[in-house]
Structures are given as C-alpha cells and as structure tokens.
Amino acid sequence: MVDRGIFMTAFAAPVAAAAIVWSALAAGLMNVEPRYVVKLAMPDDAGLIGLPPIEGPPDASRPLVVIDAGHGGHDPGASGQDGEREKDLTLMLAQSMRDALLSSGRVRVAMTRNTDRFLVLAERADIARRLNADLFISVHADAASAAEARGATIYTISDKASDSVAEALAARENRADAVNGVTLADKGQAVSSILVDLARREMRGSSKRFGELVVREGKDVIAFHNQPQREAAFVVLKSLDLPSALIEAGYISNLEDAQTMQDKVWRKKFSGSVTQAIEIFLAERQASAFAGPLPVPVDSGSVAATDGP
Ligand SMILES: [Zn+2]
C-alpha cells in the first residue's frame, strides 16, 4: 500500500495536474480566434513598391500612359464558363494596348504589372502618380449572373454610381484589396478643400471626355454594352489626380465575349481603337494647355477699374 501511495504521488499526481492544466489551456484556446500567417512581398525602404520601366520614345516631354491589368497573383478576378480567369485576360489586353501605343510611337507607356503578380489597388494608382502619368487606364473583364450580358463598358470615377449595376461592379472590383486583407483609409476626406474639389471636378470631367472618345473611336470595332459609359466609385481611380478610366472589355461570364477577348486579332483591333482615343484625348489636353489659363488680373484694384460703372 505504501508503495502504491508513493506511486500515486510520484506519477499519477503530476499526470492529473498536467491533465488539469491541459484542459484549462484547451478551454482557453477554444476561445482564441484562429490565427493565420499572411506572407507578403515587402516593399522597399520607403514603403513603396518598385516602379515599372517606361517604354517608348526616350523623351520625357511625351505624354505617359499607365496601363493597369486588373487583378493578378492570388486574386484571379472573375472567371468564365470555360474556366478562363479575368487576371489572364486583363494581362493579355493590357499587353496588346501597350503594343498598339508603342507602335504608334507618340506616347510613353508603363504597365503596373507585366506578369501574374498581385498589387493592392492603392499601389496601382500610386505607380501612375509617382511616374507623373498623363492618363491611367485599368483593364478588366466584367461578370454577371445573367450569362447573356455582354459588351464593353467604360467607367470613370464618381462618388455616386450612375446605376445599381455600376455600383455592384465597383463593389466587386474594390474587393480586390480585401483579398489581401488590406483596409484602405480614405485619405481624400482628410484633405478636402475647395481647390482639391475643383481639381477633382476637372479630372472627372476630362476622364469622362476620355470615356466618350473610347466609345466614339471604338464603335466599329468594339461591341459595347447598351449603356457603354458609366460612373462608379472605384478605389483604384479614387485617389488619382490625373485623368483615369476603367475599361471592362467584355463579359467573361458570357461565352462569346470570353472567346472574343481571347482572340489575339480582336485584341489588336480593340487596342487600336483605344489607342486612337488615347491619342486624340492627349492631343486635346495638350492643345488646351498651350492655349493657357484665362488671364488673371494682377490686383483687385484693376478689376474694380475695368469693371467700371
Ligand atoms: Zn475586375
């Protein structure tokens, strides 16, 4: 019996204690939220991602167009009925647009991505801003639950969506950041002033003009959606202080559209017409810049004098 008592103290008691500790831990652990380790490619020392190369004429006075292939990396975007992935189509479309712009030789071009890599939305816009781009175009492929929905749409930025379809699309495209667990603060609200508001209005107006030109120049080549020009609050365009647009080249959810977008010949035609719109747009902007701003009176006294009685 004594031996048995010693046994209990030496072995059974620690085992029992360990069991109590373990059950307490397990109970505690069950209340802890599951944790995940997310591995991200780290940016450079300044906290910014590297800038892509600028292609085209080695002349910094030429306008610069930044083309953004939507989605990429672990964010495939929407998918087609035959398993097509939006991120692949957008890259092919963006590369085709780059080639068309470079072959015309009038503008410089940079791409936010030229491989299957992931970028958060703010990084895409940031590349355009840091490169001092004259125009930012994000390329996507639309998706709808109705398989018959088809056609291209060009979106420009607005605080309010032009309709519920535009709103739903913006919500879906803006989700790309959630994929990476990044929440973006709306920095725009902190710096609201009349000047910022005026500049923004000007940018929205010229972005809209670009949208008109894409529809006008593409009407013989691109099968547009019956409402081809829309507005919505896209995160990727929101922070930009330069003209920008998001082109949904077609519906990946529609069999014919998905096939069309995979056709190299069609992509070339599409890019040719978008290139025409881009060049007309930039020429118009250059012309209005040459015309210069309206003359501003030197002082308020002369304004009063010229106004007269
Ligand atoms: Zn998309």
Image: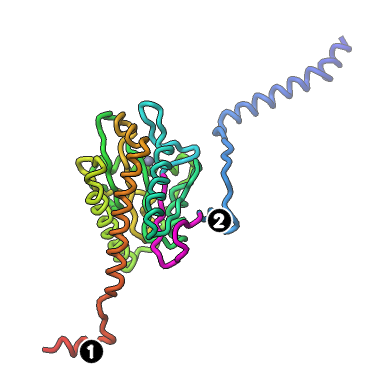
For the point 23% across and 40% down, which residue is it? 225
First-in-chain label (1 vs 2): 2
Percent x, y for residue 38?
56, 39
Residue hosting label 2: 47
Q: Amino acid at mark 1?
A: Ser
Q: Amino acid at mark 2?
A: Gly
Distance of label 1 from label 2 (alpha carbons):
50 Å
For the point 41% across and 41% down, which residue is it? 92
For residue 261, which quarter of the picture?
Answer: top left
For the point 43% across and 63% down, which residue is it? 132
Percent x, y for residue 72?
46, 41
Which of the colour schemes (rainbow, by chain, secondary structure, one colour) is used? rainbow
Is residue 271 shown in magenta?
Answer: no
Q: Mark 1: give few (<14), some (14-19) or many (20+) Cα within 10 Å.
A: few
Residue hosting label 1: 302
Q: Which residues are magenta?
A: 53-69
Q: Mark 2: give few (<14), some (14-19) or many (20+) Cα within 10 Å.
A: few
Q: Is residue 305 above or below residue 232?
A: below
Q: Is residue 190 above or below residue 215?
A: below
Q: Is residue 248 above or below residue 82?
A: below
| Tally of numbered discs | 2
Furthest toward the top, the residue is 1
Camera-nearest residue between 45 and 23: 45
In contact (CB < 8 Å): disc 1 and disc 2: no
Please tell me whether mark 2 sits on a helix, a strand or a loop: loop
For the point 78% across and 22% down, which residue is it? 14
